[in-house]
Amino acid sequence: MKDSFGRKIEYLRLSVTDRCNLRCRYCMPEEGVTSVGHGGILSYEEMLRIATAATALGVKKIRITGGEPLVRKGIVDFIGDLASLPSRPEIVLTTNGLLLAGLADKLKGAGLARVNVSLDTLQAERFETITRRPGLDRVLDGLRAAEEAGLTPIKVNMVPIQGVNGDEIEDFARLTFSHPWEIRFIEFMPVSGGLGYDSENRLPASDILHTLENLGELSSIERKGPAGPARLYKLAGSLGRLGIIPAVSSHFCDECNRLRLTSDGRLRPCLLSGEEIDIREALRKGASDQQLQVLLRDAAMAKPEKHRVGEDDYQKGKRGMQEIGG
Ligand code: SAM
Ligand code: SF4
């Protein structure tokens, strides 16, 4: 499946819930979200039909995200069903890690390939400030369990924010001397309003790179395999690698290979633009597999050439990151 700019769409991000057991300040309001309710959220059967149609069109990788995907009941079996689709897509998961320790073995057994764990601080008190919940130890246990279960290579996603955790970039980068992990620094994105952080809190990729360069000899790594948004580096003598995702400051849109499905059944051509295509209604009116494929193709064709963050008339969307899945 190609979009109107010739980009090959091979990657689907599937948000399985908008609920979460954390309240990260840059993602969710304190009171949580008004969950769209049981009828509004797609059932696993419905998601499986969409995923099947997507793989028939060439999608090779499916990322399970949320909200926090591990809070949804039945997630292990659902991952098992996705991994058993005839084309055997690669199934990966993004999680805050809180429930990972108890599930890592089961997830691996079900066919999950690997995990990305989001962690923004290595300091327990600060963890509670940023996420409004305690839990650093549980996330660290989750990382250990994922490693033991073989959900590797493990990627750790950190969003550095000026005046909040920007001073921990070096501590995170040093983890690559003791662990074969990919530590990825993601620029804060002004996806939705009213969260207390704004564009001026963003630590730009150039500043992140500058901080990493202070740590030792930093070489950039050529990416093998499909394109991705991270610019990759390695510190001499380390076991792992470092990634910087310049989500806002530099357009990697020309390499974009993804579509998103929100938990309430909207196809989202681009994270940073509000346009959505309702696939839930079609599903519930009895759409055939071919009709689902038409909607997926429509969503691919609706992908903009590039995002417009930073332009004068850019408007933040109504949906938060926890609804879209990051
Ligand atoms: N709950 C899971 C987790 O935290 O990994 C999955 C969903 S979360 C929305 C996916 C990713 O989006 C996380 O890595 C999180 O740090 C990132 N994220 C959320 N809001 C963001 C923002 N405003 N800017 C940049 N990244 C953000
Ligand atoms: Fe929850 Fe993930 Fe958003 Fe944090 S970033 S509030 S863990 S969905």
Image (cartoon, rainbow, N blue to C red):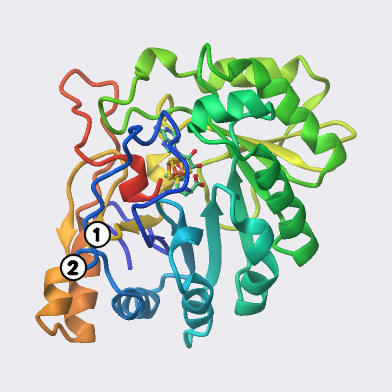
Q: Is residue 55 left or right of residue 86?
A: left
Q: Is residue 266 left or right of residue 89?
A: left
- Residue behind label 1 places its C-beta within 8 angstroms of ligand 1: no
Residue located farthest toward the right when viewing the structure as drawn: 237
- Locate residue 306: give its quadrant: top left
> Observer-nearest residue: 87 or 282?
282
Amino acid under disc 2: Ile
Residue 187 sits above or below residue 229 on the image: above
Q: Is residue 223 left or right of residue 44?
A: right
Residue displayed at 71% across by 44% down: 140
- Locate residue 108: give its quadrant: bottom right
Q: Horizontal and vertical percent for residue 238?
A: 85, 36
Q: Horizontal and vertical percent for residue 74?
A: 46, 74
From mark 1 to mark 2, how far is it between C-alphas? Answer: 7 Å
Residue displayed at 20% across by 64% down: 40
Residue 323 sits above or below residue 169 on the image: below
- Residue behind label 2 places its C-beta within 8 angstroms of ligand 1: no
Dots 1, 2 in contact, CB < 8 A? yes
> Observer-nearest residue: 92 or 118?
118
Quadrant in which the N terminus appears: bottom left
Q: Is residue 205 left or right of residue 308?
A: right
Q: Horizontal and vertical percent for residue 204?
A: 50, 19
Amino acid under disc 1: Leu
Ligand 2, image quadrant it occupies: top left
Mark 1 or mark 2: whose residue is earlier in sequence: 1
Callout 2: few (<14), some (14-19), or many (20+) C-alpha neighbours within 10 Å? many
Give the residue pinned by disc 1.
267
Q: Which mark is residue 279?
A: 2
Residue displayed at 35% across by 41% down: 321
Callout 1: few (<14), some (14-19), or many (20+) C-alpha neighbours within 10 Å? many
Residue 254 sits above or below residue 174 on the image: below
